Amino acid sequence: MKIYIGADHQGFRLKDKLSAYLKKHGYDVEDEGDNRLDPQDDFPEFAGRVAAAVKSSSDKDPRGILLCGSGQGMVMAANRFDGIYAALAWDIKSAQESRADDNSNVLCLPSHRLNEQDVFDIVTSWLQAEFAAAPRFIRRLKQIDAL
């Protein structure tokens, strides 16, 4: 599984720790920036990079992870892209449900509200969760796509 990861200045340090954690656990991680801590950077740039990378990936199940202060800006920006189902998660249950029920392919995390271990646990549970593919979930995703 290919994972594309990005963060603005508020999630920058946590992004680097999460990237190292994921690589240590055998995931193929590609950093979509920022490459340096820049207090003036803007989250839409990194949401766009990750969303575009997920959409254009040749991997059979590419995923994206985005971090900013609240996670809200990243989820709003990423969801502007067709085929991206970005979800904001603040705990394991919200992450798992976003995969099982909504087939999320981008996870957005609030770096101001989570510690390092929480992020590792949330991301691990999200990566391991599978889409339930219940008829009602498929129907709802088709409705989203038709909007």
Image: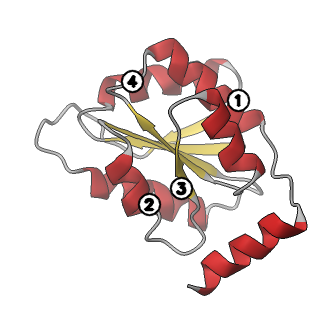
Quadrant (top left/top right/bottom left/bottom right) for the N terminus: top right
Q: Nearer the viewer, residue 85 or 54?
A: 85
| Neighbours of disc 2 within 10 Å: few (<14), some (14-19), many (20+) | many
The mark nearer the N terminus, 2 or 3, is 2
Image coordinates of residue 95 in percent, x first then y, are 63, 38
- What kind of element bears circle 3? strand
Q: CA distance from mark 2 to mark 1?
A: 21 Å
Compared to residue 116, the image places residue 119 above or below, namely below
Give the residue at mark 1. Answer: 125
Q: Which mark is residue 78?
A: 2
Left or right relative to 83: residue 38: left
Q: What is the three-letter code of the residue carrying label 4?
A: Leu
Left or right relative to 97: residue 55: left
Q: What is the three-letter code of the residue carrying label 3?
A: Ala
Q: What is the three-letter code of the residue carrying label 2?
A: Ala
Left or right relative to 36: residue 14: right
Toward the bottom, the furthest residue is: 146
The mark nearer the N terminus, 4 or 2, is 4
Check contact, mark 2 vs mark 3: CB within 8 A.
Answer: yes
Image coordinates of residue 144 in percent, x first then y, are 62, 76
Residue under the image location 33 percent in, 23 percent down: 13
Q: Nearer the viewer, residue 18 or 104?
A: 104
The mark nearer the N terminus, 1 or 4, is 4
Give the residue at mark 4. Answer: 14
